[in-house]
Image (cartoon, helix red, strand yellow):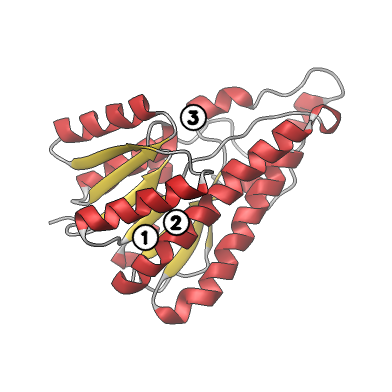
Amino acid sequence: MGRFSDKVIIVTGAGSGVGRASAMRYAADGGTVVGVDINGDAAQKTADEIAGAGGICHPVELDVTNEAAVAATVRAVVETHGKLDVLANIAGIGGFKRLQDTDMDTWNRYLTVNITGPFLMCRESMPHLLETGGAICNIGSIAGVKGQPFSVAYCSSKGAVVMLTRALAVEFGRLGVRINAVCPGGVDTPLLGNFIPPSGGGGTKLIERISLVDEMARPDEIANAVTWITSDEASYVNGSIFMVDKGCVA
């Protein structure tokens, strides 16, 4: 019997990186995982790997910015499995870009994926989490609590995730649903390739201030925090902005 035996969990961004690692950890701990990703093939690959290890993961192709699709997916999960216990909002995008190079398409895309997506998932999941006394983990970032160069859209979106988490924690804490955020530092995932400092203008020197150590976290190290904070072991933790950054924001 694992920590998530008899629990139904939705993990967004389950096709790669921290989302994939979290889906695998939830399944290894006995949970029934619904792994959603905008890349259906990637979600299926994660589900196949989990099944090969003896776990349960149902892949779903989903764009978390599509309001109607989010509502339909959450509804289908509850209709199929009878309930929802945990929501892990991990899908996200990011990268470095100078202010003057940040066009409206980039700005809108970052905010839509990184904050509108979690908002929609939280809104549609909340009625069901209220029934089970469930938990939500949103993925923030050190960029949501500390200034970061070449990241105006990314910092803005992740700062919004922090405040979304705090607002919901206050609104629903007395009603039995816990909402927390895990904020990683650098993580060795495919997304990391987007965070390349622009040339010129002292970019490399500016980047040095956002990291205390050179090594990146492994996705499973972040997944450990995600699963713990949504487990019964963290029953008194609500509204926490949990830094997993090797002391970067200390």
Q: Horizontally, is 152 left or right of 186 in the view?
A: right
Amino acid, disc 3: Asp
Residue at the far bottom: name it.
174
Q: Is residue 208 visible to us here?
A: no
Please state, as top left, top right, bottom left or bottom right, where the C terminus lies in the image: bottom right
The residue that disc 2 covers is 137
Seen at 59% across and 50% down, the residue is 116
Whether tag 2 and tag 1 are in contact, CB under 8 A, the answer is yes
The residue that disc 3 covers is 188
Local SS, label 3: loop
The residue that disc 1 covers is 230
Local SS, label 2: strand
Compared to 132, does 225 lie above or below? above
Compared to 53, does 193 lie above or below? above
Mark 2 nearby-residue class (10 Å; few <14, some 14–19, many ≥20): many
Seen at 30% across and 60% down, the residue is 84
Amino acid, disc 1: Thr
In three-dimensional space, the C-alpha distance between marks 3 and 1, rounded to whole angstroms, equals: 23 Å
Residue 237, by quadrant, is bottom left
Q: Nearer the viewer, mark 2 or mark 3?
A: 2
